[in-house]
Each structure stands twice: as structure tokens, then as C-alpha cells.
Image (spheres, rainbow, N blue to C red):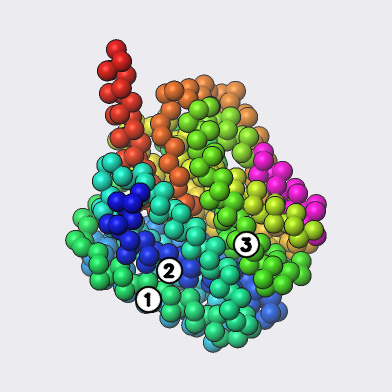
């Protein structure tokens, strides 16, 4: 871990600053939208726009990088992010914010592809797993820190929009001045969605449902907080609780997944996530229990993402894993686009509790589907399963490709150990 930190500190620092900026703008818009009098439906459209842009960026970024190179793409899109952040408080119109969210989602997706290419290039076969884990921790820590920077000024003013703009601009400096050489960039043709669904129906369904859960957390948690009357400090802690839970529970669940049937664990974790959603929906008027529910929902949903990737890889040949990653991201993105809109509709229909009703229904759906799939196909025994690698839901195909490399290395080591034992 120390070796990774020493060799890639500038990249990790830059990514941390980018995540702080991204984490601030998402929550800040939810709070500011309430101040400006935007309806829940209007805010759900604004929040969904980010994920539409993110999905588009993940599809188009590789071509941009091949045409003009990593450095130009990274610098140009980071500059555009910084500019859009300043425009939000200048034009407080729903259509302007929606367009801005599309642009920012697109830009962040392409920036992540670029940065993750550099990180993957800097890592070796021996420390790639550690690099991915450290990268995920840095990302999550940046989002958590962002929630408390919201306390630095009045959200009805201009300053809180300037802070993430400056952070994104500064983030470019250590990366562009220290990263060398520019990595080679190659993409693998994505596996067709039909074939991917045949390989792992549970993995595909789970990724689609989790896309909705993640986008509700990232896009609508602050809107929910405003609707139930939380103060800005309370909203900050509430949103942060989702990500704190993900960091604390990611590795214990990963440890368990290497020692038991992954499909059973997916069902169990999903059931706990559903219970956490019910807790928030029924007892969310108690602030302490609201934080517990956020911790549980975030702590279950993020490990589920990594579990579903590991479960899918268990049914793939090594040479197909990189191709499958693109399809998995696309499915997750489709679910993410619809998440805030459906959440907003439910919040309008049944009140703020519709936020937790939505996440609870998605978790319950995954429980039911996982239980049904258990009757259709034999699970991969724990001793034959591949490695579990902690992955952030904002990871791009580059990181999932690196996960495939880690999986391959682990498989080769296991094979060598078995041959030596025989």
C-alpha cells in the first residue's frame, strides 16, 4: 500500500480533490433547489441528468482520448467542470441546471476514465489490488469530506459553488505536472448485453437495480433531507453516512464473500439493505435512526456492487472479463438514469418517505430474484470462486478491466498452489 501511495500520490491527491468537488455539487444542488422553490419532480430531473451525462461520457471518452490524448482530454474537461459549477448560482433555472448536470456528468466520466488509465498504468501485477482499494478509499473519503465543506458558507449564496470550482481547477495541477509517461490506451469491444445476460442473469439484474439505488443516494438524499426539514449540518451528516457505511462495511463483506456462496451473500446483504430502508421509512423522524438507516443502506449497496462483479466474473472466462465490464457499466447506468426520476415521483405521491420506499423495493426485488435464480443454477463453490475486489460505483471500464487483471492473477496463483500441492 505504501509503495502505491508513494508512486501515485499526485494522482490520488488530484482525484480526492475532484471527488470533493463532485460530492459538494450534488448535495449542494439538492439543498439550493429547496431554497429556490424547485419541486421534487424538477429536482429529480436535474439529478437524473448527471447520470445520463455520465453514461454518455463512459461511451465517448475512449474515442476522445485516442484522438487527442489523455492530457488534453483531462485538462479540457476539468476546465469545463469548473466553469459549469460557477454557472449554477448565476442561472437558477431548471433547464440550465439540467444541462449543467448533463455536462458535468459527461466530463466527470471522461476524467475518471483518464485518471484510472494513469493509475492502472502506474500499478504492477503485485500491487494492482492494493491500488484499486486505495483508489476507492480516496474517492469515498473525498465525498465524505465534501459534505462538511457545505458548512463553510450559506447555501443560498455564491461561495459554496466557488469552492468546488476552485478544487476541480486545483486538482488538475498535481496530476498534469507529475504523471509521466502518458499511458497507452486501448479498449476492448464490449460483450453484447444478450450474451452477458445469459452468462449472469443475477449480475445483470443486480447491476440495473443497484444503479437506481446509487443514483437515489447520490442524487436525491439531499432533496429528501430538505423535504423532511433537516438543517444543512444534518443533511451533510445524513449524506455522509451512506458513504461512511460503504467504507466500513466493504471489506468485512468482501472477506465473507471469499468464504461462502456469493449468491447467498448477495441475498443476505440485499435483505439487510431492504431492512435499513424500512427503518428509514418508518422511523426516519428520529434523526439518530435516520443516520443508522443511511449507514446500513450505503454499507450494503456499495459492497453489493463489488459482489455482483465478482459473481459475474465467476461465470466468465478470463479473456471475456474485460469485455463484460463495459456491458455491466452500461446496465448500471441505465438503472441510474431512472433512479432519481422514480424517486421524485414516489416522493410526490407518498411524501418524503418515497425516497426509502424506492431503495427498499429495489433491494427486495434483488432478494426475490436472487432466491429464484438459486433454484435455476448451481452456485460456484467458495473454493472455486475468484477474488473479491472492492470497487467504487463510480468506477469506469478501466477500473473494471483492472479488476479482471487482479482476478486473473489470483486465479493463476491458485492454480500454481494447487499444482504444487499435488
Cβ atoms at labels 1 and 3 below 8 Å apart: no
The range drawn in magenta is 271-285
| Marked residue nearer the N-terminal end (2 or 1) | 2
Cβ atoms at labels 2 and 1 below 8 Å apart: yes
State the separation of the CA atoms marked 2 and 1.
Answer: 8 Å
Q: Position of residue 260 (x, y in %)?
A: 53, 27
Residue 123, can we see it? yes
Which sits in the foreground, 147 or 99? 147
Q: Looking at the figure, which quarter contains the C terminus? A: top left
The image quadrant of residue 57 is bottom left
Q: Position of residue 352 (x, y in %)?
A: 75, 62
Picture residue at 56% right of the left edge, 86% below the top: 158
Vertical arrangement, residue 158 with respect to residue 14, above or below: below
Q: Callout 2: helix, strand or loop?
A: helix
Q: Main secondary structure of the magenta part?
A: helix
Mark 1, residue position:
170
Q: Position of residue 400 (x, y in %)?
A: 38, 46
| Magenta-colored stretch includes residue 275 | yes
Mark 3, residue position:
239
The image quadrant of residue 37 is bottom right
Q: Callout 1: helix, strand or loop?
A: helix
| Magenta-colored stretch includes residue 238 | no
The outermost residue toward the left is 181
Amino acid at each position: 500500500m505504501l509503495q502505491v501511495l508513494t508512486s501515485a500520490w499526485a494522482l490520488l491527491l488530484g482525484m480526492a480533490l475532484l471527488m470533493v468537488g463532485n460530492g459538494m455539487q450534488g448535495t449542494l444542488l439538492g439543498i439550493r433547489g429547496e431554497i429556490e422553490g424547485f419541486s421534487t419532480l424538477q429536482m429529480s430531473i436535474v439529478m437524473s441528468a448527471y447520470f445520463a451525462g455520465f453514461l454518455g461520457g463512459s461511451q465517448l471518452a475512449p474515442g476522445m482520448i485516442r484522438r487527442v490524448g489523455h492530457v488534453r482530454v483531462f485538462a479540457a474537461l476539468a476546465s469545463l467542470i469548473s466553469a459549469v459549477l460557477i454557472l449554477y448560482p448565476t442561472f437558477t433555472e431548471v433547464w440550465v441546471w439540467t444541462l449543467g448536470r448533463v455536462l458535468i456528468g459527461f466530463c466527470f466520466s471522461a476524467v475518471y476514465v483518464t485518471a484510472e488509465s494513469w493509475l492502472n498504468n502506474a500499478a504492477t501485477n503485485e500491487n494492482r489490488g492494493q491500488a484499486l482499494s486505495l483508489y476507492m478509499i480516496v474517492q469515498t473519503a473525498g465525498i465524505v469530506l465534501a459534505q462538511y465543506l457545505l458548512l463553510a458558507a450559506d447555501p443560498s449564496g455564491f461561495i459554496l459553488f466557488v469552492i468546488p470550482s476552485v478544487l476541480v481547477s486545483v486538482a488538475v495541477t498535481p496530476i498534469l505536472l507529475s504523471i509521466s509517461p502518458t499511458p497507452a490506451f486501448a479498449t476492448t469491444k464490449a460483450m453484447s448485453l444478450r450474451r452477458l445476460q445469459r452468462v449472469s442473469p443475477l449480475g445483470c439484474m443486480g447491476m440495473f437495480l443497484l444503479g437506481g439505488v446509487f443514483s437515489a443516494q447520490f442524487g436525491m438524499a439531499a432533496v429528501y433531507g430538505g423535504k423532511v426539514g433537516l438543517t444543512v449540518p444534518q443533511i451533510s451528516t445524513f449524506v455522509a453516512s451512506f458513504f461512511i457505511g460503504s467504507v466500513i462495511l466493504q471489506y468485512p463483506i468482501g472477506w465473507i464473500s471469499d468464504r461462502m456462496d456469493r449468491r447467498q451473500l448477495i441475498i443476505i446483504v440485499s435483505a439487510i439493505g431492504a431492512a435499513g430502508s424500512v427503518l428509514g421509512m418508518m422511523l426516519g423522524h428520529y434523526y439518530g435512526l435516520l443516520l443508522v438507516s443511511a449507514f446500513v443502506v450505503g454499507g450494503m449497496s456499495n459492497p453489493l456492487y463489488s459482489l455482483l462483479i465478482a459473481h459475474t466474473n465467476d461465470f466468465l472466462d478470463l479473456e471475456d472479463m474485460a469485455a463484460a465490464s463495459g456491458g455491466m457499466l452500461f446496465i448500471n447506468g441505465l438503472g441510474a438514469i431512472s433512479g432519481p426520476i422514480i424517486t421524485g415521483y414516489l416522493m410526490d405521491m407518498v411524501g418524503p418517505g418515497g425516497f426509502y420506499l424506492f431503495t427498499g423495493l429495489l433491494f427486495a426485488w434483488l432478494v426475490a430474484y436472487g432466491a429464484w435464480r438459486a433454484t435455476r443454477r448451481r452456485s460456484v463453490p467458495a473454493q472455486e470462486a475468484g477474488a473479491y475486489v472492492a470497487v467504487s460505483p463510480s468506477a469506469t471500464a478501466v477500473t473494471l478491466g483492472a479488476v479482471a487483471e487482479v482476478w486473473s492473477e489470483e486465479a493463476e496463483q491458485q492454480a500454481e498452489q494447487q499444482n504444487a500441492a499435488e
